[in-house]
Structures are given as C-alpha cells and as structure tokens.
Amino acid sequence: MPKDALSPLLQSLYSRKCCCSLFSRLAIASCGARGFRHQEQCQSLMRSVDILTSKVAKGSSEEEIIRSLCNDQACDAIHLSPNLINILLRRYKDDWKSALGLFKWASLHSNFQHSPESYDMMVDILGRMKVMDKLRDLLDQMRCEGSIITLNTIAKVMRRFVGAGQWADAVRIFDDLQTLGLEKNTESMNLLLDTLCKEEFVEQARQIYLELKQHIAPNAHTFNIFIHGWCKIRRVEEAHWTIQEMKGYGCRPCVISYSTIIQCYCNEQNFSKVYELLDEMQAQDCSPNVVTYTIIMCALAKAEKFDEALQVIERMRSAGCRPDTLFYNSFIYTLGRAGRIDDANHVFKVEMPKAGVAPNTSTYNSMISIFCHYAEVKRAFDILEEMEDSGLCKPDIQTYHPLIKSCFKMGKIDSWLNEILNDMVNKHHLGLDLSTYTLLIHGLCRADRCKWAFSLFEEMIGLDIVPRYRTCCLLLEEVKLKNMYQAVEKIEDLMKKL
C-alpha cells in the first residue's frame, strides 16, 4: 500500500516505523415486550417474519437474497420497522449472507431508516464472522447515507477489526471520525487505545497515544488502559512506569491502577515488589482494598508461602479494611492448604458471623473439601447438612465431588455413594456433568464395579455428553476383563468417532 493511501495518523506512525413458525412466536413475544399492545399488530409482524424468512431461504448469496426479496409482491407490501429488522438480524446472527441481504434490501426503501441498534447488530454479525471487506463496505454505506452513527457503533467496528488482527483499519476509522459526525476527543481516543490494548497491540497503542497527546489531553482512564495493557503482555515494569507518568500529568493513581500491577507481580511471584507497591500506596494515601489483599493472599497461598499469606490478614486488619465473602473464602482455602483445618473452621464458624459476612456456596464447598482432604468425612457431611438447613445457598455439583472421592477412598460405595447420588439428582435436582461422570466411572472401575461404571457410561452417552478418551480406554480395559462383549463393542465404536 502506498504511503499516501494511508490515513494521516497511520502515515505518521509508519514514518516513525512502527424454524419459521417457532420463530414467529418468538417475534410475537418480542413485540409484546416492546409495547405492541394490539394482537392485530403482533399477527402482522408474525406474518412479515414468515414471509421474509421464506424468501431469504431461496438465496445462496446476499445478491440472490436481495433479488428474491425485491421481485416479490408480498415483500413489497410489508411495513418495515426497526423492530422487524432487529428480529430478523437476531434470527440470522450466524448467517451473515442472509442478514446482510435483508439489511441491504431494507436500505433500498426510501421511506425506511435503519436504527442505530440495527447497525450495531449488523456490525457485530460481520465482524464476528470476520467478513471484514463487507464490514468496510457497511461503514462506507453508513457514511454516504448520512446515517446516525454513534460512538458505540464505532467501538464495535474497531473491536472487530482489531480482533481480526487488522489494527490499522481501526486507526483509519478513528481518523475518519469527523466525517462520520463524531469528535476526536479524549473519550474516542481512549476507546481506540483500550481496543488495541485488550487485543495486546500495546506498543501500537503507545505510538498512537504519543502522536495524539499533542492534540488530545489524556485523563486517568487513559493511563489505566496502558497499565492493564502492559500487564496483559507481562511487561510489568512499563506498567509501573506508567504510574509515574500518570502523576506527571496531574492524574492520581487509584486502587485499581495499583492492584492491576500488584496482580501482575503476584503472577510472577515477585512478592518483594508487591510489598513495595503496598507501601507506595499507603504513602500516596491510596489505601489497598479487600480485592487487593485477596489477590496477594491467594498468590502467596498458591506459592505455598502460608505464613506470609496469613500475615497479609494482620496487615489488612491493621489497615482497617473490612473483609468480604470472597476474601474469607480465600482465607479459608489458605488455611486448608496450610493444614490448619481447625483454624479454617474457626474462621467459618466464628469470624465470619462476627463480621456479619454471610457464607456462599463456595465457602461451604471449601470447608467440605478441606475436611474430606484430611479424612474428616463426618465433619464434611455435617457441613453439607448445615448448608442445606441454612437457607443461604444450595449445593452445586462441586459440593459433592470431594464427598464422592471420599466414598472411593474409604470403600463406602454401597453405603454412601448411592445416597449421595440420590441427593444430588432427586433432592437438589442437579444434573451430572462430564467431570462428575468421569469421576464416578474412574472410581467405579478402580473399585471393580465396571457394570455400574458402564451403566453410567451409557447414561452419559444418552445425554449427549461425550466421554474423554482416557475414560473410554480405562472402561474398555475393565469390561474386556469381565468378558462384557456388548460393552466392548459399544465402547470401541464410540472411540472410533472421537
């Protein structure tokens, strides 16, 4: 591409080397939700949807679809409305040719104007299907028609181009904002920078910012965008330096700015830098919040630095920061990993009620998992019973996994496992998922209960849950040993399809 064909901003950057009936019923429901009060209007909309979808089905390209619609008297008689077009665009959200054919056909009517929502939907469809040439054409059409283009529409266009790796097109769109009736200002600049940074084009975003800052003033959000961007590509030193740049522009870093960098240092297990940043936050009168402390404690626990993780609790308390449920869940998990199950239980039973923080399903699941891990199975069942009686939350699939594992470890298959499965399915109406079936089949095979394992295997196949290849191999080996020839044949047939 010759340089003079590029937008002004890019020139500068390069110079610096850088099924119908069912759908009709849905249409009626939609029109009701939007205020169509009269049954006759709803029926009219239903008929319009049926007519248009039947004609669209006859075309294999957008041009054929347009011809099919234009050459039909029934289509000509349809009263077009933004709501009708939006319903059809939702119908064809995964079929860009049909969606674009309908969209262009509607545009041919001189007395009809697409709504901003319709443009947004069409942009999303083309961008998601990565039909970028058509997306460019749509943008040109919007410009030529003088359509009402919102910054939200432009945001979607830029995100789709950058997501497709075509970041230069997003810059061209920004350069053309004024021709689209929009301003180049801090808000639109931040939109472009954020789009680039989220897709990891952080260096390009930085070059663009250096060019634009001469004309457009940055704000605190501008710098936070770069902090997130640098951290995303693991260049945490640049993110930390951005804090200093931020201050130079008179923008005050917030707790989110610091916490983003702290999380990045935590991921690298560079805890000395984490503590330096905590001290810096205090010096800048920017107190860490509960999210900051939770990030640090979880990272320390993951690194098996349990004593340091527990010291974070004391630091948090001395700073007067109030814990929340997520924090306590992480605290309980940390204590469990450290083998301090009685301390974890004390936090759950005493400290959380004292602080007025209610447990959730994850809290109970953590306690159950801890007790099962340390073979305190009776205490785990007590927690489950307490959870059921509390009225605060309900068990989920993950609640039962540690209990199922304990059944196999302790050989309590007949006495406990049936009862657990009965409670899951009949009492709490939980459907078994892939991980649960896998856990059960593997456990039953190891316990020499391959008939039960195979019955569960058939059950999951009947539910269209595809087993893992490893599960098939394990079960196949077991049924062969038991001379279960029909089971062997079924498993081998399935494995050929995986």
Image (cartoon, helix red, strand yellow):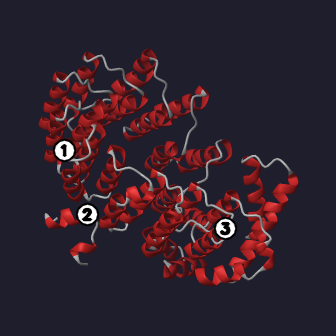
Tag 3 or tag 2, which sits nearer the N-term?
2
Amino acid of disc 1: Ala
Task: Label 3: state its secondary structure.
Answer: loop
| Image position of 128 (left or right of 287) | right
Residue 8, labelled with which disc? Answer: 2
| Figure check: 118 above or below 397 | below
Give the residue drawn at x 28%, y 43%: 222
Q: Specify the amino acid type for callout 2.
A: Pro
> Which residue is drawn at the image coordinates 51% and 64% (left, top)?
142
Query: Which label belongs to residue 110?
Result: 3
In the rendered image, which quarter contains the N terminus? Answer: bottom left
- Cα distance in 3D space between marks 1 and 2: 28 Å
Front in this rendered view, residue 317 or 15: 15
> Residue 226 at x, y = what percent?
24, 47
In this rendering, which labeled residue sits more in front, label 3 or label 1? Answer: 3
Density class for disc 2 (Cα within 10 Å; few <14, some 14-19, many ≥20) is some
Q: Quadrant of residue 345?
A: top left
Residue 8 on image: x %, y %: 25, 63
Which residue bears the numbered disc 1? Answer: 239
Asked whether the viewer can see residue 159, the reply is: no
Residue 440 lies, with reference to residue 240, above or below; the image says: below
